[in-house]
Image (cartoon, rainbow, N blue to C red):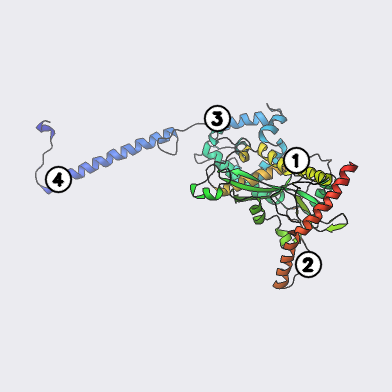
Amino acid sequence: MAAEDYIFFDDSDDEFDEMMEDHFRREKELLSMAALQVGQSSRQHGGSVVGRRYKNRRHSWHNDRLMEDYFVPNPTYTDADFRRRFRMRRPLFLRILQCIKQHDKYFIFKPNASRTMGLTGIQKMTAALRMLAYAGPADALDENLKVAESTVLECLEHFCQAIVDIYGDQYLRRPNEADIINLLNMHGSRGWPGMLGSIDCMHWEWKNCPKAYAGAYQGKSRRSSIILEAVASYDLWIWHAFFGMPGSNNDLNVVERSTLFNDLANGRSTPCTFTLGGNTYDHGYYLGDGIYPKWSTIVKTIPNPQNNKQSKFAAMQEGQRKDVERAFGVLQSRFAIVSNPCRLWSPVKMTKIIYTCIILHNMIIEDERDMEEDYFYEGAPTPPHVWRNDMIGSALELEFHVESQMSYRSAQLHRRLQNDLIDHLWGFSGNQ
């Protein structure tokens, strides 16, 4: 390097300070110019993060296309296409959309953070339903619906929360007195007087289960899962849903923790009385498989029948118990997100999704049920409870609680009810 390329200055402190101030001033100017250029570049691309490319998805144009495909008076696709892709009929879709728009402002068509009009409520609800129905990756909806991955997950979360808040009390309720009458008539006409439904459990695999929870959530298949306990009737309506038990448990552990028999255990229940074989029973029963305990509220099959009566009872019980299996099958085929391994990280979000699918399942059954059919559940949010005894004082309350527990857990009543059903079904099948 030549000597003229060097900068020489004497030992004067004042000259050195001036040189450093000038150097720092020039560096500050360069940094300001660079920041200005970066800011102009980011505004030019429109992204919120420096270096991220803005994608103009033309939300308005794609909303018009979605409307032309499904929601105009003469749409491109038929009602059958709408029913297959949205899992429900168009009037039910619009009714749900109107309710969730009133409940959550997230679904209202409004400007977004960039001061441009964002997604419409139809686009957001369609994205959420496609996630529930097809269970694909969130990024897969970007090609057709032009909704970003993070927005799809956000739509799903808001939609599930709104469905549970609005419709949970109505479509996840316990059967009230009118519902019980319909259930008794429905199952009684098929040879099962006093039957309220079938009970069973289903495992939902949890793909992204944290390693710290793997020991509790892994079952015999060595895969993490969460258990859903449900009660379904012949028309596939799900009357009871209890979700959240780790997959390492079995049906016995789940029924002990379930809320299904809380009313009976606490001494209050909706009236349900029937007579069979000369004996009167003051509560209904559910059909279960062999793992369930011998309670008077659960009727199991006979694993090794010894005569024709027992063989007929076992065949009819195992056939009728398939109601809950059919309900699980319809639920999983209707909403594939339940049948595929869940890729979420939070059990709370999984709970909202499973309850949302069950609520929509019941709403679709109600919407598509023939209006001339006898079994139509209008339903009240809270069924009336009838106390079977007047309890005064904690001692009487505890005594009555123990008595109620012994009543619905009685193995003796279980055997008596099973014998009465064996004789009844033998005569019923002969008359048929």
Q: Residues within 10 Å of mark 2 (few under 14, many from 20)?
A: few
Q: Earlier in the sequence, mark 2 or mark 1?
A: 1
Dot label at residue 404: none
Q: Earlier in the sequence, mark 4 or mark 3?
A: 4
Report how far apart the C-alphas of labels 3 and 2 lie in the structure. 62 Å
- Residue type at mark 2 is Asn
Q: Which residue, given by chain and number where applicable, does mark 4 sit on?
A: 16
Dot 3 lies on which element? helix
Any part of residue 176 in sight: yes
- Residue type at mark 1 is Asp
Q: Which residue, given by chain and number where applicable, does mark 3 sit on?
A: 143
> Looking at the image, is mark 4 or mark 3 nearer the viewer?
3
Dot label at residue 367: 1
The percent coordinates of residue 177 (x first, y second) are 80, 54
> Looking at the image, is mark 2 or mark 1 nearer the viewer?
2
* Front residue of this view, candidates 20 and 201: 201
Report how far apart the C-alphas of labels 3 and 1 lie in the structure. 31 Å
Report how far apart the C-alphas of labels 4 and 3 lie in the structure. 62 Å
